[in-house]
Amino acid sequence: MKVQVKLFARARDIVGVDCVELELPEQPQVADLRTALTRQFPDMESLVPNLLVAVGQDYADETTAISKESEVACFPPVSGG
């Protein structure tokens, strides 16, 4: 199943675009998304485990389901004040 994923900040900088299409297994979860990101973009390997992933309007955990219609976004953690 193909899913569009929006990338922000450092993730976007590493990949060079703000949106990518990933091939995921049927009935994917966020954990599958992380695996696909690392496989397709090896330079993101150190960043992927720390990405905040949103599915729809909510932050997701590793077991959150993703559908073809899901709006998916990945944000690196931010710090500062």
Image (cartoon, rainbow, N blue to C red):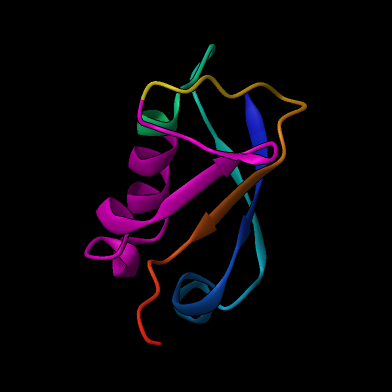
Q: Residue at x 66, y 36 (%)?
A: 3
Is 40 positioned to the left or the right of 27 in the image?
left
The verdict on residue 35 being magenta is yes
Q: Is residue 79 above or below residue 29?
A: below
Q: Is 47 displayed left or right of 64 in the figure?
A: left
Q: Residue at x 39, y 32 (%)?
A: 61
Measuring 35% from the left and 79% from the top, which residue is drawn there? 79
In the rendered structure, does residue 28 fall within the stretch colored magenta?
no
Q: Is residue 53 left or right of residue 55?
A: left
Percent position of residue 32, x then y: 39, 30
* Residue 36, position as x, y percentages in the image: 41, 41
Q: Which residues are magenta?
A: 33-62
Q: Nearer the viewer, residue 39 or 33?
A: 33
Relative to residue 25, is residue 5 depicted above or below? below
Q: What residue is rendered at 29% in x and 57% in y?
A: 50
* Rendering coords of residue 38 (x, y %): 33, 52
The residue most toward the bottom is 81
Quadrant housing the N terminus: top right
Left or right of 56? Residue 31 is left
Percent across and percent down for residue 49 are 26, 52
